[in-house]
Amino acid sequence: MSLNEIETQLKALQKTATDAIASVESLDNLEPLRVKYLGKKGELSQILRGMGKLSPEDRPRIGALANEVKEDLQNRLEMAKSHLETAAIAAQIEAETLDVTMPGSYRALGRQHPLNSTRDRMIDIFVGLGYTVAEGLEMETDYYNFEALNTPADHPARDMQDTFYLPNNNLLRTHTSSVQIRYMENHEPPVRVIAPGRVYRRDTVDATHSAVFHQVELLAVDKNLTFTDLKGTIKEFLNQMFGEDLPVKFRASYFPFTEPSAEVDVQWQGKWLEVAGCGMVDPNVLKAVGYDPEVYTGFAAGFGVERFTMVQHKIDDIRRLYNSDLRFLQQF
Ligand code: DAH
């Protein structure tokens, strides 16, 4: 091959390689080009193999030209590489850009259900009066729900109409009074406990009745407790619950587990509201748990949580408390 031919080939190589490098669009395609043109078995080396036949005078010229082409292509490869790297970073930044002006995803703030906040207020008041919180079971036996509470087998409260009976002599407790027995069985007097919880009755659901509702049970047993202590405790509780000193009435009533028994009415905003059943713990109940009724007396009461919630928040239908309607719940 002649000097001219080699020169022409080198120039042609430079041109093709320059175009190829210029049109590369990804980093991955760059290295194959380097190998193709400048690699050991690349096109440049192929051309230089023809140099052997040149005269010693011509060789340096071709050598110089070959170096020039090689350096030029190396520079171009370097530059292409750095451009593509910059572009890749720019693309990544672009793809990962956060538009901080875009609206965030809305997370609703939870809030306490009005039944729970009312229950907690009731608990707090009694805790302030020295009571502790006791818990029982929602599935009970006939013994704890009725028998130990001096409720005879023929008592109407035991009627299938009122109680959800379950297999194996179990039932869903109809009141939190069952916790009285469970607590006293495991503790010696003096007793000062409250038992908040869910209770069940086979009531037909309407604006004022629900098959599931909530009570707070109160129980105190000690030496020398009297009806006056009961009245004072309930009066104090109601004063704190309503935030003012309201007229309170104790109306004679009947419960199997208390003697005497009363129902408690409070006059609020001109209306008498029935808010609790109460009484002195029947000696038979004390006997059932092994307390000596000659030594100890006690008083007890049962408050409805729904009642307080509904009057204080002016809720007209008990069902609103259970149907999870956010439009209703968001008001609290
Ligand atoms: N357990 C009764 C009910 O559910 C309420 C009650 C009345 C509870 C008198 C008591 C009490 O502790 O002494 O209707």
Image (cartoon, grey):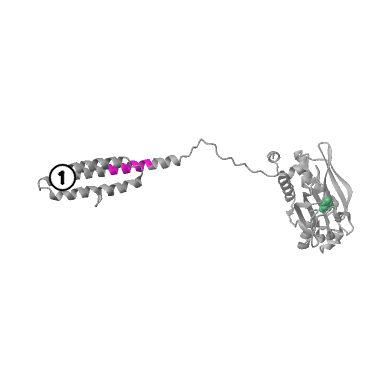
**Was residue 267 drawn as part of the magenta stretch in this picture?**
no
Whole-percent x, y for residue 107 in the image: 60, 42
Q: Tell which of 133 and 98 is nearer to you.
A: 98
Residue range in magenta is: 76-87
Secondary structure under tag 1 reads helix
Q: Is residue 199 visible?
A: yes
Whole-percent x, y for residue 118 in the image: 73, 45
- Mark 1 sits on what residue? 62
Crowding at mark 1 (Cα within 10 Å: few <14, some 14-19, many 20+) = some
| Dominant SS type (magenta) | helix
The response on whether ligand 1 sits within 8 Å of label 1 is: no
Whole-percent x, y for residue 324 in the image: 70, 44
Q: Quadrant of residue 104?
A: top right
**Was residue 84 drawn as part of the magenta stretch in this picture?**
yes
Q: Residue at x 22, y 47 (%)?
A: 44
Q: Tell which of 82 and 52 is nearer to you.
A: 52
Whole-percent x, y for residue 321 in the image: 74, 44
In the rendered image, the residue lying farthest to the bottom is 290
Q: Residue at x 19, y 45 (%)?
A: 67
Residue 142 in the figure: left or right of residue 41:
right
Q: Residue at x 26, y 41 (%)?
A: 16
Residue 53 in the figure: left or right of residue 98:
left
Q: Is residue 239 visible?
A: no
Q: Tell which of 173 and 103 is nearer to you.
A: 103
Q: Quadrant of residue 320?
A: top right
Q: Tell which of 200 and 20 is nearer to you.
A: 20
Q: Quadrant of the C terminus?
A: top right
Number of numbered discs? 1
Q: Which three-letter amino acid code belongs to the residue tagged 1? A: Ile
